[in-house]
Image (cartoon, coloured by chain):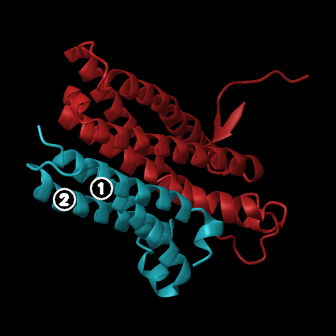
Amino acid sequence: MEITTRGLWTLVHGMGFGALYLLACSGALVELWRRYAKDDLSPISEREEAFLRWYLLAMAVLAWITVLTGTYIIYPWYRAVPPVGTANLAGYPQRLLLSNPATSGWHSIGMEWKEHVAWLVPISITMAFAVFNHHRRNLRNHPELRATVLSFMVVSFLAAGIAGFFGAMLNKHAPVEGGPTIRVMEGESR
Amino acid sequence: MTNGSGAAAVLAAGLGSFTLAATAIAADESSTIKNLMNFYHPTGPLSGVTTAAILVWIAFWIVLERHWRNRNVAMGRVGAIALVFLVLSLLLTFPPIADLF
């Protein structure tokens, strides 16, 4: 069982940071919607408040790591230009996709959307963290601000979902592979 | 506690998101802007588009924070404007829509 370093980076970026962000997003949305509503009269403990602060901070860090690894580590491998006359485009995912009309849309729509829409996520969640860190339980007294933050978080969830979906489909049709191979464990041969 | 800081963060996020989408379209349409946005060659114009948007977002945030931090602003209106910018960004990054420009 082996994996290339480029494959491992793609795995860490998508199934690690990206998927973890999506999972975390649903939890934060529920917490912010349920516990910080104006009509919720139950007191919010300092522990609960601190938990959500750290939770949102962790989400913001995750979002930034995801877009930065995607943009500056994986994307250069994806868009690498093959030398003239290269027949096997396996190491050049963008060119491989564009070489076939049946797959070119995964680049021209999928990657073109993913590479930009993903950046709405760290902007939105950093804002959500900053607002919560400033207002904390007082956010209950600002229902319109809370509603706007929740809306941004829903859009960030949607944007992360779009980026994640196209990332998975792109990797299915033209995986980013290459670099030194890491042997994970020895398999049985029959 | 006033809502000014929160409103500043929200509107700046909307404006920063919109800047990202608008700059991406501009870089796609103009070869001059495309070349200008090529901050880091292996990543290409995406490096400049995203860096420019982040800088604009932070600049808006600092300016709005300075103006609004001790004030109460019309959060309903500010929130609605910020959300319009955000939804526009989501739509404008979608290539079939971006290609209309």
- A121 up-or-down from B55: above or below: above
Q: Distance of mark 1 from mark 2, alpha carbons?
A: 8 Å
Kindly identify which numbered label has been placed on residue B62. none
x 31%, y 34%: residue:
A57
Kindly identify which numbered label has been placed on residue B64. 2
- A33 up-or-down from A17: above or below: above
Looking at the image, residue A181 sits to the left or right of residue B54; the answer is right
Task: Kindly identify the amino acid type of the residue bearing the numbered disc 2.
Answer: Leu
Secondary structure beneath dot 1 equals helix
Near-viewer residue (B81 or A179):
B81
User: What is chain B's hue in the picture?
Assistant: cyan
Dot 2: chain letter: B
Residue B28 in the image: x percent, y percent?
55, 77
Chain letter, red in picture: A
| Residue furthest right as drawn | A190
Residue density around tag 1, few if under 14, some if 14–19, many if 20 or more, within 10 Å: many
Task: Kindly identify the amino acid type of the residue bearing the numbered disc 1.
Answer: Leu
Give the mark nearer the N terminus: 1 vs 2: 1
- A144 up-or-down from B61: above or below: above
Near-viewer residue (A183 or A133):
A133
x 76%, y 67%: residue:
A98
x 44%, y 25%: residue:
A30
Looking at the image, residue A187 sits to the left or right of residue A130; the answer is right
The quarter of the picture where the C terminus of chain A appears is top right
Looking at the image, residue B11 sits to the left or right of residue A167; the answer is left
| Residue at image mark 1 | B11
Residue A99 in the image: x percent, y percent?
80, 68
